[in-house]
Image (cartoon, helix red, strand yellow):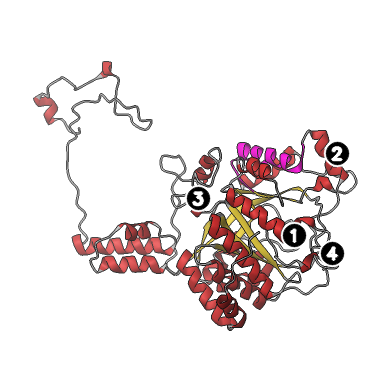
């Protein structure tokens, strides 16, 4: 495994610069890459199994099955959760499970054998296919360490996958530390899996977990490692900065949690190391009412937020309501947009299996973000009513494009694309600018023309599904008949 390339100047800057200066720098870098868009993914959380072979000292997700409790969710259980999510407008089905539970828990091995599955990940692949086929939700898979064959199989039935790097510190594997007796948390093993995802062109999520005993220098090392893998393969679409939360009935129940300044510093470091294009996420539910402050450090994504299921990894921390998430985002001067489990940057044949790509595109708008409503051209759903957003902040790129046009600049492709990408308040600003051009050019007069349609034939070689004009050859009405004076005086066309 290649060590992350050292960047001593950036490391020193991150460790020595005042926090306020780092935050301002991170915001500037973020805005250069993402403008004012702040994304989130409406999802359902499907905990296929809570059994795991690892013993992470901070985890309450992993637990032995109670007496009489099934080791895994059944297909009916999975579909029930997914269908409720689809009804609530979700687009992502987040499958989360423990690492290889059948290697530690006899109940897991017995259940898999009884159902005819060789492994947990074989069952997972079938459940992803079931959800994709029956509900149209797009699976995002967090299955821990996987083999190459498992990744290949899951790529055919999912939109994206993820594996938290968490840390590159080997100290945390020592006896008494958080990853002791957790073989799947060896840094080289996790980095090799992230690399394998790049080799297989899988849209991928990774991240770090802070406050579990690592130093700031070790956090920087982990971020450099992800940066280098992404530079090589281009597959890491988002990086999560997740703060440790102490939980009862765990060895770390009494441990101190990272404070807000420590979290903000780490997010800013991630942004400055990973650059403007990377999506950087911090879970809003782990910062309670202070979550809007996370935008000050350069995040552009809130991650998956569910209107249906709790955060099974952090059940003590409820998701914010979507309305509250939108209000908090707007107070921070940003515009909330829905996204899919695969980002616009990776929505193509190069990254998504041909069997999955059509479903992804059906859920995406013209820019690759998630649809805000059910309206599509040619569909039956009514167009959405516009919401007043005049007081919301505008994107600097749209403002520059409008100013250039106002000065008479000839629009090029980049300027036109900028205008078509307008969202929120910028849509109203583009419309207002267009109305001002109309007023200068034509005043308030509205013109119309009286015309006659001369339909010289209604024979057509095409059979467009929306068209009522063409008729079969035997029903032609005007292909060879001359126009009479009576026909010429008749109204209409």
SS label for mark 4: loop
* Residue indicated by mark 2: 110
Magenta span includes 3: no
Dot 3 alpha-carbon crowd within 10 angstroms: few under 14, some 14 to 19, many 20 or more: many
* Residue indicated by mark 3: 371
Quadrant the N terminus occupies: bottom right
Label located before the other in sequence (1 or 3): 1
Q: CA distance from mark 3 to mark 4?
A: 40 Å
Identify the main secondary structure in magenta.
helix
Up-down: is 85 above or below 330? above
Label located before the other in sequence (1 or 2): 2
- Does residue 372 appear left or right of residue 173 in this picture? left
Question: Between residues 70 and 196, which one lies in front from this camera angle?
Answer: 196
Q: Residue at x 14, y 26 (%)?
A: 487
Question: Between residues 126 and 16, which one lies in front from this camera angle?
Answer: 16
Question: Between residues 28 and 152, which one lies in front from this camera angle?
Answer: 152
Q: Which residues are magenta?
A: 118-140
Question: Between residues 231 and 60, which one lies in front from this camera angle?
Answer: 231
Dot 2 alpha-carbon crowd within 10 angstroms: few under 14, some 14 to 19, many 20 or more: few
- Does residue 285 appear left or right of residue 342 in this picture? right
* Residue indicated by mark 1: 186
For the question of whether residue 27 can be seen, the reply is yes
**x, y percentage for residue 72?**
79, 43
Q: CA distance from mark 3 to mark 2?
A: 42 Å
Residue 423 sits in quarter? bottom left
> Any mark on residue 250, and which?
4
């Amino acid at each position: 495994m290649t060590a992350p390339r050292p960047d001593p100047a950036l490391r020193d800057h991150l460790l020595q610069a005042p926090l306020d200066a780092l935050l301002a720098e991170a915001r500037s870098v973020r805005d250069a890459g993402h403008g004012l868009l702040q994304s989130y993914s409406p999802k359902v959380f499907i905990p296929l199994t809570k059994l795991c072979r690892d013993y992470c000292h901070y985890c309450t997700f992993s637990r032995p099955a109670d007496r009489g409790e099934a080791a895994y969710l059944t297909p009916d259980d999975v579909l029930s959760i997914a269908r409720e999510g689809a009804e609530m407008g979700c687009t992502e089905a987040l499958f989360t499970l423990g690492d290889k539970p059948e290697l530690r828990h006899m109940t897991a091995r017995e259940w898999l054998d009884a159902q005819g599955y060789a492994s947990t990940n074989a069952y997972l692949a079938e459940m992803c296919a079931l959800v994709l086929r029956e509900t149209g939700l797009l699976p995002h898979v967090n299955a821990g360490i996987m083999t190459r064959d498992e990744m290949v199989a899951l790529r055919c039935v999912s939109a994206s996958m993820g594996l938290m790097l968490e840390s590159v510190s080997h100290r945390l594997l020592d006896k008494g530390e958080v990853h002791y007796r957790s073989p799947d948390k060896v840094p080289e093993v996790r980095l090799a899996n992230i690399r394998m995802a790049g080799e297989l062109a899988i849209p991928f999520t990774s991240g770090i977990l802070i406050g579990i005993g690592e130093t700031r220098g070790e956090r920087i090392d982990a971020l450099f490692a992800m940066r280098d893998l992404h530079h090589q393969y281009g597959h890491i679409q988002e990086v999560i900065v997740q703060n440790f939360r102490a939980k009862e009935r765990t060895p770390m129940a009494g441990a101190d949690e990272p404070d807000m300044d420590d979290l903000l510093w780490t997010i800013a470091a991630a942004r400055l190391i990973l650059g403007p294009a990377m999506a950087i996420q911090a879970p809003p539910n782990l910062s309670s009412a202070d979550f809007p402050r996370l935008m000050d450090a350069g995040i552009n994504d809130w991650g998956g937020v569910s209107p249906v299921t709790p955060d099974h990894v952090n059940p003590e921390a409820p998701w914010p309501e979507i309305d509250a998430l939108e209000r908090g985002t707007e107070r921070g001067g940003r515009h909330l947009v829905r996204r899919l489990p695969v980002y616009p940057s990776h929505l193509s044949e190069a990254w998504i299996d041909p069997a999955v790509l059509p479903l992804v595109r059906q859920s995406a708008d013209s820019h690759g973000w998630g649809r805000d409503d059910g309206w599509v051209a040619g569909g039956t759903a009514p167009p959405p009513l516009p919401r007043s957003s005049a007081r919301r902040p505008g994107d600097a790129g749209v403002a520059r494009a409008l100013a250039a046009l106002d000065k008479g600049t000839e629009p090029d492709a980049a300027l036109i694309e900028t205008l078509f990408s307008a969202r929120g308040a910028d849509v109203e600003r583009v419309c207002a600018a267009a109305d001002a051009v109309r007023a200068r050019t034509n005043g308030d007069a509205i013109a119309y023309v009286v015309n006659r349609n001369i339909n010289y034939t209604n024979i057509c070689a095409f059979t467009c599904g929306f068209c009522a004009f063409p008729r079969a050859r035997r029903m032609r009405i005007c292909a060879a008949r001359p126009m009479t004076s009576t026909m010429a005086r008749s109204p209409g066309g």
